[in-house]
Image (cartoon, rainbow, N blue to C red):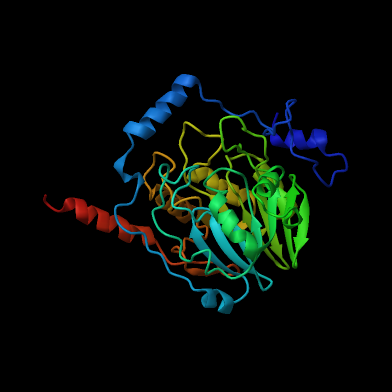
């Protein structure tokens, strides 16, 4: 069954789609059946991650990071955006600050002595951040939901907007329930003049061996008066992007996952070709590729997402925003500098070209 047919069967009033689908055991599921790895394939992936990973999945030279001060943020014009790393983006909307999937820990992992380690530090610390109007969480994986960051951010954050079940985790961690709003797909809320709509994604959830899909995953539409931004969270490519574009597009900026992909897990992360198609489906004006440049989560070169999406966008003559980490971007005119990652690659090549 396709995503569109799932809508046709469940859309009772022709205007809204009710809650995300659940299985008989109460777990959330995607409308389209997902590809499942067999035991041997899963074992092969784990062994390759452990013993046969390409050397270029981690940069050998420093990635450029623009340090940010609290005063710079307070002085920044409205509709400014700052990419802090991976899928963490700081937006200034209607005079207030919003964070997507804030991850500030050294490792995207349940422990800090093992697991994917940051390529770079965040351009600003949690302590230096100004008051946060709201945090938008797409799902509960460790590279998107950082326990230590949430606890540190709690005192300076007014609202947490989450998919169903993720908010329950926050409350269990000690976040006051009054601060938490949980949304199903197509449900919306208004906070401080900003409209937020939880929209579908094709992914999965869980933080351990026994909680897979007990919480929902989502993308988000973010509207500040006449400006619209799309935040993909994590997703495989599916025709839900067309429906989101039809209902809520066009978007001034789409922040679309472009990284941590592999042909062996095609349903949960998009290849760059699919990321660009999602942007087109969404009726986006400018695309900002996220979910890259901070953690080693796949088998591709660290710069491969940037190389491929840049070439694909150039072929289609579609505008792309690829700001250096921490550099300010105007959401209304989000055209950034060129291929900053090429300079890092050149330094790496020069280093390995030197005789031993």
* Residue found at x 57% / y 79%: 75
Residue 178 in the image, given as x and y percentages of width and height: 76, 56
On the rendered image, what quadrant is the N terminus found in? top right
Q: Residue 136 falls in which quadrant of the image?
A: bottom right
Residue 351 lies left or right of residue 67; in this view the side is left
Residue 205 in the image, given as x and y percentages of width and height: 61, 38
- Which sits in the foreground, 236 or 125? 125
- Which sits in the foreground, 9 or 168? 168
* Residue found at x 59% / y 67%: 331
Q: Is residue 111 visible?
A: yes
- Which sits in the foreground, 92 or 161? 161
Residue 348 lies left or right of residue 246; in this view the side is left
* Residue furthest out toward the right: 13
Height in image: 248 above or below 163? below
Q: Is residue 146 visible?
A: no
Residue 347 in the image, given as x and y percentages of width and height: 26, 58
């Amino acid at each position: 069954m396709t995503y569109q047919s799932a809508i046709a069967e469940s859309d009772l009033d022709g205007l809204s789609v009710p809650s995300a689908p659940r299985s008989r055991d109460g777990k959330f599921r995607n409308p389209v059946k997902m590809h499942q790895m067999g035991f041997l394939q899963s074992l092969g992936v784990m062994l390759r991650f452990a013993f046969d990973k390409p050397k270029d999945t981690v940069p050998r030279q420093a990635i450029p990071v623009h340090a940010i001060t609290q005063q710079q943020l307070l002085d920044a014009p409205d509709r400014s955006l700052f990419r802090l790393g991976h899928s963490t983006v700081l937006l200034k909307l209607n005079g207030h600050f919003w964070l997507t999937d804030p991850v500030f820990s050294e490792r995207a992992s349940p422990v800090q002595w093992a697991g994917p380690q940051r390529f770079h530090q965040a351009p600003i610390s949690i302590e230096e951040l100004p008051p946060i109007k709201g945090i938008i969480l797409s799902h509960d994986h460790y590279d998107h939901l950082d326990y230590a960051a949430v606890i540190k951010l709690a005192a300076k954050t007014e609202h947490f907007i989450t998919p169903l079940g993720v908010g329950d985790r926050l409350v269990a961690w000690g976040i006051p329930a009054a601060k938490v709003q949980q949304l199903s797909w197509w449900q919306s809320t208004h906070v401080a003049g900003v409209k937020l709509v939880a929209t579908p994604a094709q992914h999965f959830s869980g933080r351990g061996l026994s909680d897979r899909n007990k919480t929902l995953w989502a993308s988000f539409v973010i509207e500040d008066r006449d400006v619209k931004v799309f935040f993909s969270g994590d997703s495989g490519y599916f025709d839900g992007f067309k429906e989101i574009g039809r209902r809520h597009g066009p978007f001034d900026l789409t922040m679309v996952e472009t990284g941590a992909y592999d042909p062996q897990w095609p349903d949960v992360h998009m290849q760059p070709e699919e990321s660009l198609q999602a942007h087109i489906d969404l009726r986006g004006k400018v695309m900002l590729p996220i979910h890259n440049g901070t953690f080693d989560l796949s088998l591709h070169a660290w710069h491969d997402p940037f190389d491929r999406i840049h070439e694909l966008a150039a072929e289609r003559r579609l505008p792309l925003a690829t700001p250096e980490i921490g550099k300010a971007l105007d959401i209304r005119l989000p055209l950034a500098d060129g291929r900053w990652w090429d300079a890092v690659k050149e330094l790496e090549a020069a280093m390995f070209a030197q005789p031993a």
